[in-house]
Image (cartoon, rainbow, N blue to C red):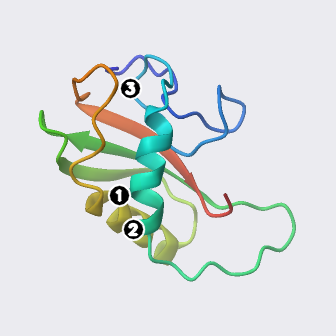
Amino acid sequence: MLGSGKEAAGASGGTSDRNQMGGGGGDDGYGSKVRACVRPKVVYNTPAREGTNNPTLQYRVDLNNDGTVRNVRILRSSGIALFDDAVQKGIAKCSPFPKPPSGKYPSYIDGAYRMYE
């Protein structure tokens, strides 16, 4: 799962319509587990959607060998500072991350968190 760039949970145009992408190796349902862990921990008052715009934050989560979160980095901002902060905090609260199907945590997971999904 380490760094090959294949999607563990997919993104628009990917193998599934989920938010988190892993360090590779296919989905195997892992992306859904990560999403289920992160999404309820993001505290943000999402405004009603207007038009087709869907602010998206791209991030990288560095993980320890036991799945605990070592660091959350914003790779590309959504352009909304409060949303970015809420997502970053929500990801950090998902510690330890769900165990991958392989049983071994990757050193990092890349993902895209969309406001409207």
> Residue shown at 23%/54% (left/top)?
95
Q: Residues within 10 Å of mark 3 (few under 14, many from 20)?
A: many
> With 72 as the anchor, is 40 left or right in this view?
right
Query: Where does label 3 land, which residue?
Result: 23
Q: Quadrant of residue 17?
A: top right
Q: Position of residue 47 (x, y in %)?
A: 68, 81
Who is closer to the viewer here, 73 or 22?
A: 22
Query: Where does label 1 land, which residue?
Result: 91
Q: Residues within 10 Å of mark 2 (few under 14, many from 20)?
A: some
- Inspect the image, locate mark 2, and give the three-letter code of the amino acid beneath it: Lys
Q: Mark 2 against mark 1, which lies toward the viewer?
A: 2
Q: Position of residue 78 (x, y in %)?
A: 57, 61
Q: Which mark, by number, is residue 49?
A: none
Q: Position of residue 51 (x, y in %)?
A: 87, 68
Which numbered disc flags the more N-terminal residue, 2 or 1?
2
Which numbered disc flags the more N-terminal residue, 1 or 3?
3
- Inspect the image, locate mark 3, and give the three-letter code of the amino acid beneath it: Gly
Picture quarter with the N terminus:
top left
Who is closer to the viewer here, 29 or 26?
A: 29
Q: Residues within 10 Å of mark 1 (few under 14, many from 20)?
A: many
Instruction: Verify CB contact (< 8 Å) between mark 2 and mark 1.
Output: yes
Query: Where does label 2 land, which residue?
Result: 41
